[in-house]
Amino acid sequence: VRLAQRVGDRVGGLAALRLERGLSQKQLADAIGTSQPHIARIENGRPNILLATANELAAALGVTLDDINEALGFDGRST
């Protein structure tokens, strides 16, 4: 069982993608040239990250931009 699956709903979104790849917040931050606190803020629901940051996250995690948008709670559907 993957770590992200074991912790279930307590870890969702971007954190789950990161944990599935065995990365710490610091490792992910280093991979995209930002700080660990910035990754923590994004994982904790900081709204409105830059598109460039989302693209960097997608590349570092080996996922699509759509996956990042979904992980951050942006599914592209109007309400």
Image: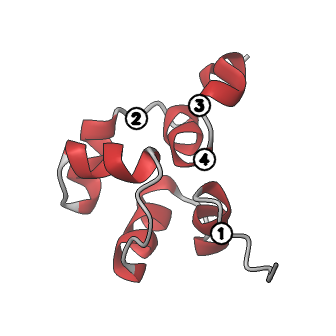
| Vertical arrangement, residue 50 with respect to residue 13, above or below | below
Instruction: Characterize the local packing of mark 1: few (<14), some (14-19) or many (20 or more) Cα atoms within 10 angstroms.
Output: few
Q: Name the residue tied to disc 4.
A: 13
Q: Quadrant of the C terminus?
A: bottom right
Can you give x and y, in whole percent of width and height, for residue 8 in the image?
Answer: 71, 24
Dot 1 or dot 4: first in sequence order is 4
| Vertical arrangement, residue 51 with respect to residue 4, above or below | below
Nearest the eye: 38 or 64? 38
Q: 45 left or right of 35? A: right
- The amino acid sitting under disc 1 is Phe
Q: Name the residue tied to disc 2.
A: 23
Q: 54 left or right of 27? A: right
x 57%, y 44%: residue: 17
Q: Which of the 4 quarters of the picture holds residue 74?
A: bottom right
Do residues under tags 2 and 3 come within 8 Å of each other at their CB atoms? no
Q: CA distance from mark 1 to mark 4?
A: 10 Å
Dot 1 or dot 3: first in sequence order is 3
Dot 1 or dot 2: first in sequence order is 2
Q: Name the residue tied to disc 3.
A: 11
| Label at residue 74 | 1
x 62%, y 26%: residue: 10
Which-is-in-front pick, marks 4 and 2? 4
Which-is-in-front pick, marks 1 and 2? 1
Nearest the eye: 34 or 60? 34
x 44%, y 65%: residue: 47
- The amino acid sitting under disc 2 is Leu
Secondary structure beneath dot 2 equals: loop
Do residues under tags 1 and 3 come within 8 Å of each other at their CB atoms? no
Instruction: Characterize the local packing of mark 3: few (<14), some (14-19) or many (20 or more) Cα atoms within 10 angstroms.
Output: some
